Image (cartoon, helix red, strand yellow):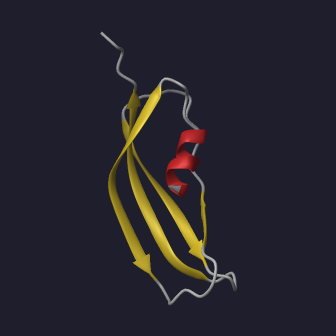
Amino acid sequence: MTTGLALAFGLPSEARTILVRLTTDYLKKARGTITAVAEAPLFADASEREVPVEAALTDAAGEVVARVTAHWRVGAARKAS
C-alpha cells in the first residue's frame, strides 16, 4: 500500500497503475509497531512503463526489518467508449 500511495502522488491525472510483481526480503524479526516508508519519482506523462518502488519497513526501535519492492505497470487510462 505504501508503494502505491507514493507512486500515485507523482503520477499525472490521466495515468493508471496495476501491481505486476511484489518481492519481500525479511531481514530480522520485528518488534512493536511497524512503519513503512516509500519514495517514488514524479512523472510528466502517462507513457507506458514498469516502475519498481521500494519500501523500507522499520520496527519500534527504528531498525529496518524488511524491504519490499513493488513493480507497478504505469500507463494512460483507457477512454470510456
Q: Is residue 70 above or below residue 58?
A: above
Q: Residue 19's x, y, as percent?
A: 36, 48
Q: Is residue 75 above or below residue 7?
A: above
Tell whether 46 sits left or right of 80: right
Q: Quadrant of residue 75?
A: top left
Picture mark count: 0
Q: Residue 25's x, y, as percent?
A: 41, 77
Residue at x 40%, y 25% (from the top left corner): 76
Question: Which residue ends up furthest to the top in the rendered image?
Answer: 81
Q: Quadrant of residue 57?
A: bottom right
Residue at x 45%, y 67% (from the top left corner): 68
Residue at x 55%, y 56% (from the top left corner): 2
Residue at x 56%, y 69% (from the top left corner): 56
Tell whether 28 sits left or right of 21: right
Q: Is residue 47 above or below residue 79?
A: below
Question: Which residue ends up furthest to the front in the rendered image?
Answer: 32
Tell whether 28 sits left or right of 62: left
Tell me the quarter of the image containing the C terminus: top left
Question: Which residue ends up furthest to the right in the rendered image?
Answer: 61
Q: Residue 5's x, y, as percent?
A: 56, 48
